[in-house]
Amino acid sequence: MEQIKEEISRLKREKNAIILAHYYTPQEVQKIADAVGDSFYLSRLAKETKHSILVFCGVSFMGESAKILNPEKKVLLPEPQADCPMAHMASVEKIKQMREKYPNLAVVCYINSSAQLKQYADICVTSSNAVAIVKVLPNSEIYFIPDANLGHYVAKQVPEKNIIVNDGFCPIHKELSVKDVLLAKKTYPDAKVLVHPECLPEVVKLADYVGSTLEIIEYATSNHAKQYLIGTENGVLFELKRKNPNKEFYLISNQLLCTDMKKITLEKVRDCLRDETGQVEVSKELEEKAKIPLDEMLRLGKVIQKEIS
Ligand code: 13P
Ligand code: SF4
């Protein structure tokens, strides 16, 4: 283990590489990463980094977005087979039909999507900026792809718009049930319930706080409660506990495990850095088209941030 870590550090220095990891990756991967974050933070970093090689410890849509935002750089995925099933859960045909039906429609695409889908969208969003972005869009009709649950959550927060949601879902968050939450609340009645907006609307309703992985971590860190019930993938527990050693965190269900994120290992990080394998390739045409909604998200994200501060 120590030897692999040393090899990774050496290769990183020699190749001017940076390692980015999502909070859902295994903790040993989070420990060696230069930056760990949620999808929005990582995509902003990917755009701004000066390193020539980016190792993206996450699922394939994350590496793909990093490559599109940084086409001149080498983006390596330690496990190219790690994929997010939801990233493919929308139909191009349906998007076209919706555009015909609603001429002033904005197609809003959750960043958890393939570039193949993104190219048909007007703007991308992440779980941390979806509500704010949909609110400021000039369009009153929105087609939200691919995640139905995040779509429903946004629709609830932005009632003034007609938000039509597609029927995709995260197979991990979708499995969290009302029963699971009620049972956990019974065991820990004083605990705050924090869930990701990819959970079902009836689960979201029971939460004290709904947010992206980073927002959940920030909420628990600044809140005074001692106990928290966590309704998102178990990888976030590492950062939650690291930042809050005196607080208690309980995963609401043991099923909250993204098997794709867990495919990333230290050995695979070392190997891809050493051999420069797992390179993300996106055709020029697709890159140009899918970059538009991603850039638009980053541009609007900055405007919204300025207005808040
Ligand atoms: P975040 O947007 O919170 O990083 O979540 C990404 C994700 O894959 C949720 O399942
Ligand atoms: Fe995709 Fe769900 Fe895994 Fe997130 S947790 S990467 S949405 S399968």
Image (tube, grey):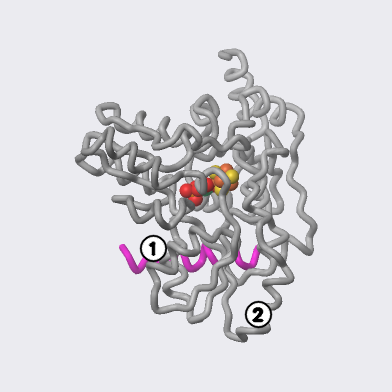
In the rendered image, residue 167, in percent from the top left (x then y), is placed at 59, 62
Query: Residue 108 placed where, x, y %?
Result: 56, 68
Report ligand 2 position as a quadrant. top right
Residue 84 highlighted magenta (yes or no): no
* Above-or-below relation of 159 to 111: below
Residue occupying the point 46% across, 68% down: 133
Question: Foreground residue, 77 or 232?
Answer: 232
Residue 201 x/y as whole percent:
43, 57
Please give the label number shown on residue 305: 1
| Residue in view at x 44 percent, y 35 percent | 253
Q: How crowded is mark 2: few (under 14 residues within 10 Å), some or many (20 or more)?
A: some
Mark sitting on residue 99: 2
Q: What element carries label 2?
A: helix
Residue 142 is left or right of residue 77, and the answer is left
**Percent position of residue 169, x then y:** 57, 54
**Circles 2, 1 touching at the beta carbon (< 8 Å):** no
Q: Which of marks 2 and 1 is nearer the N terminus?
A: 2
> Residue shown at 56%/13% (left/top)?
2
Which contiguous range is marked in magenta? Answer: 291-309
Residue at figure coordinates x 43%, y 62% from the top left: 153
What amino acid is at disc 1? Gln
